[in-house]
Image (cartoon, rainbow, N blue to C red):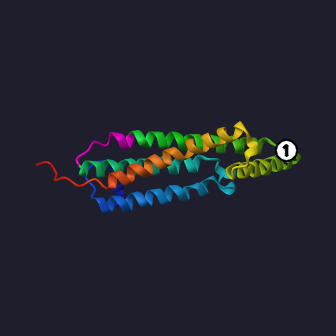
Amino acid sequence: MNLRSLFSPSGRLAPLPFVLAVAAVYLLSFGSQVLLSKPVTARLSVLPFVLAQAVLIWIWIAVHRRRLRDAGRSGGLAVGIAIVYALEILFLAIIAWLILASAGAATDSAGRESAILQLFFILYLLAFLHGDPLLGSLHIWYMGIVVLMLLPVAISFGFSVWTATRASVPPPP
């Protein structure tokens, strides 16, 4: 499988090359979180992360459509799942951009106060995730947001496993 065929949704893809390609896409997607680090976002904002995710989503669609075609199935569901995942990435990018915008607008003394507020917010989230019962209804909201952020990832991973387990069919004559 060459680089050109990796971007093309046409053709067929056997199970083993599909598993290798999808594993690489998931690893690169996980690794692209580095593009949300402070040194990158300080210079270029969240744009490199969004561009990397757009390329990885396209490759994800291409390899899934090729594998589904090899299994004699339609690739439309792969596009739908990729759209849901893209919306999750857009949500994450907007949140990161808003955090960066609020941190960048602060003056030096306000920036120190903002850093303390962010520290307390992170500690609060950690206490929340450990099941502190004092959070009340806010606990439900945070858990809902966490589920909303992880659900597209779980759906796409489950779909990849399902796609990999479909048997190949002979090509049409």
- Residue 7 at what x, y percent from top left? 37, 52
Q: Is residue 171 magenta?
A: no
Against 156, residue 3 (above or below) is below
- Residue 133 at what x, y percent from top left? 73, 45
Q: Residue at x 39, y 49 (%)?
A: 159
Label 1 element class: loop
- Magenta region: which residues? 72-79
Q: Nearer the viewer, residue 63 or 6?
A: 63
Say whether residue 168 is left or right of residue 147: left
Residue 80 location, quadrant: top left
Q: Residue at x 89, y 47 (%)?
A: 109
- For residue 93, say whether it is visible: no
Q: Nearer the viewer, residue 117 or 131?
A: 131
Q: Nearer the viewer, residue 110 or 122?
A: 122
Residue identifier under label 1: 107
Q: Residue at x 85, y 50 (%)?
A: 112
Q: Nearer the viewer, residue 106 or 134?
A: 134
Say whether residue 111 is left or right of residue 82: right
Q: Is residue 77 magenta?
A: yes
Amino acid type shown at disc 1: Thr
Quarter holding the N terminus? bottom left
Against 21, residue 142 (above or below) is above
